[in-house]
Image (cartoon, grey):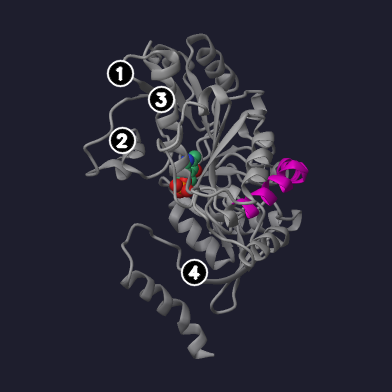
């Protein structure tokens, strides 16, 4: 019994001893999970209200996805793209159909999908739009989060993400998020793309003003600029639609997908676009050893099929309404603001009460796991398989934490 109680601190010490300190995890050591629930090494259970930053939209170990992974592990796991394998075509076709695009390009991580989008947009700019060599620019938004590579942090506005990682990649213009006039003014004859998150997740689940995304779509069409929507966190059911852009009836030229596409099992990302855009790539110009591997395709095809039923989008809408109603009832009782859409919420805690980190630590003590972002903000993104009772439980625990 005493041994058991010591396991958590020991495991945390070991993890800190042998890793770079590029994360500051909550003091919980997880050993198993099912659906919306995690179990730690001491047998304590926690309701997962982060879902791997939306990589676990279908919950932990969704039976359909686990079965697909097991079956594929027993047959074929990797070929590289040097050879075609039998899982590839179905995955690409079904994902393209879900996105209503001609083509997809599979990669592994979200950052790779963003890098792919940037490379494709630049090549499209030179070859199709006719931008002068080396002059292409891409318009991005303040407060963005698109990943961690050197090019991507080059246009981050978060000093922690950028400081001491230069020299930076040129060719990006940063404008305030949600400000259509500023974006319109930033587009010039060398602009090849506007790259945006339709809802800024990392920034605190920031929803742009109504009409902003349709306005961006209109400007991009008028000025012959690609609209690239980074739906890596906002997409695949999280907001109550397949894509966050759907809420405003907007179709971007390119979707960047990741996180939930891998079913919480393997890293799978993808770019989806029409042939006049993705068709600019020729053999040898872009690729990835693991991108589109058989295991990834087998799992991700089942992810696409789960989404094609519409069930998860529906759950996100209905349960999201319940979550947001519960959270709104806490505004003025420890919360100062609640934002979001579907089963996705950014909460600003009254900073005189406690930090976001402290709130998450206290929530963890009460068996609910969430993640702070930027000071007094907490992000909630539970698995879309969460139940009404579990949502009420999470809101009740938050209320108790805020009541001190
Ligand atoms: C997580 C995320 C990324 C980066 O994905 P990784 O798999 O961590 O590289 C890019 N864009 C958005 C909007 C994200 O939320």
First along the sequence among labels 1 and 2: 1
Residue 178 at x, y percent in the picture:
49, 24
Q: Within 10 angstroms of label 4, few (less than 14), some, or many (20 or more) residues? A: many
Q: Which residue is mark 1?
A: 133
- Closer-to-camera residue (63/186): 63
Q: Which residue is mark 3?
A: 123
Is 164 colored magenta in this rendering?
no
Q: Which residue is mark 4?
A: 28
Q: Which residues are magenta?
A: 297-319
Residue at mark 4 to residue at mark 3: CA–CA distance: 45 Å
Residue at mark 1 to residue at mark 4: CA–CA distance: 51 Å
Q: Which residue is mark 2?
A: 154
Residue at mark 3 to residue at mark 2: CA–CA distance: 19 Å
- Closer-to-camera residue (73/272): 73
Residue at mark 3 to residue at mark 1: CA–CA distance: 10 Å
Mark closer to the observer (1, 2)? 1
Placement of 11 over or under 168, stated as above or below: below
- Residue at coordinates 48% horizontally, 44% vertically from top-left? 110
Regarding residue 153, the answer to whether it shows in the image is yes
Mark closer to the observer (4, 3)? 3
> How many numbered dots are placed on residues in this image?
4
Label 2, secondary structure: give it.
helix
């Amino acid at each position: 019994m005493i041994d058991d109680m010591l396991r958590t601190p020991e495991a945390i010490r070991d993890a800190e001893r042998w890793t770079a300190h590029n994360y500051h995890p909550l003091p919980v050591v997880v050993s198993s999970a099912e659906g919306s629930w995690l179990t730690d090494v001491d047998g304590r259970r926690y309701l997962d209200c982060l879902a791997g930053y939306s990589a676990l939209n279908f919950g932990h170990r969704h039976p359909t996805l686990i079965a697909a992974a097991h079956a594929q592990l027993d047959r074929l796991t990797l070929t590289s793209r040097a050879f075609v394998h039998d899982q590839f075509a179905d995955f690409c076709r079904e994902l393209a159909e879900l996105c209503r695009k001609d083509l997809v390009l599979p990669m592994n991580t979200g950052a790779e999908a963003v890098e792919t989008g940037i490379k494709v947009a630049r090549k499209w700019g030179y070859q199709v739009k006719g931008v002068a060599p080396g002059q292409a620019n891409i318009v991005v938004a303040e407060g963005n989060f698109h990943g961690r590579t050197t090019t991507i942090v080059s246009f981050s506005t978060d000093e922690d993400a950028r400081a001491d990682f230069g020299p930076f990649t040129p060719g990006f213009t940063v404008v305030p998020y949600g400000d259509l006039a500023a974006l319109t003014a930033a587009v010039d004859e060398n602009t090849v793309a506007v790259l945006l998150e339709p809802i800024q997740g990392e920034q605190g689940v920031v929803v742009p003003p109504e009409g902003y995304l349709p306005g961006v779509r209109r400007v991009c069409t008028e000025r012959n600029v690609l609209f690239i929507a980074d739906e890596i966190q906002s997409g695949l059911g999280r907001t109550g639609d397949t894509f966050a852009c759907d809420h405003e009836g907007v179709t971007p030229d390119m979707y960047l997908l990741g996180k939930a596409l891998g079913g919480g099992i393997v890293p799978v990302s993808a770019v989806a676009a029409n042939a006049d855009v993705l068709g600019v790539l020729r053999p040898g110009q872009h690729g990835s050893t693991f991108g589109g591997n058989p295991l990834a395709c087998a799992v991700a095809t089942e992810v696409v099929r789960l989404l094609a039923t519409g069930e998860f989008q529906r759950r996100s809408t209905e349960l999201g309404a319940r979550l947001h109603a519960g959270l709104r009832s806490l505004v003025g009782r420890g919360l100062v603001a609640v934002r979001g859409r579907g089963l996705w919420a950014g909460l600003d805690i009254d900073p005189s009460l406690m930090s976001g980190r402290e709130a998450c630590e206290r929530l963890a003590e009460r068996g609910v796991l969430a993640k702070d972002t930027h000071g007094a903000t907490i992000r909630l993104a539970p698995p879309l398989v969460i139940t009404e009772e579990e949502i009420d439980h999470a809101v009740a625990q938050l209320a108790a934490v805020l009541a001190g």
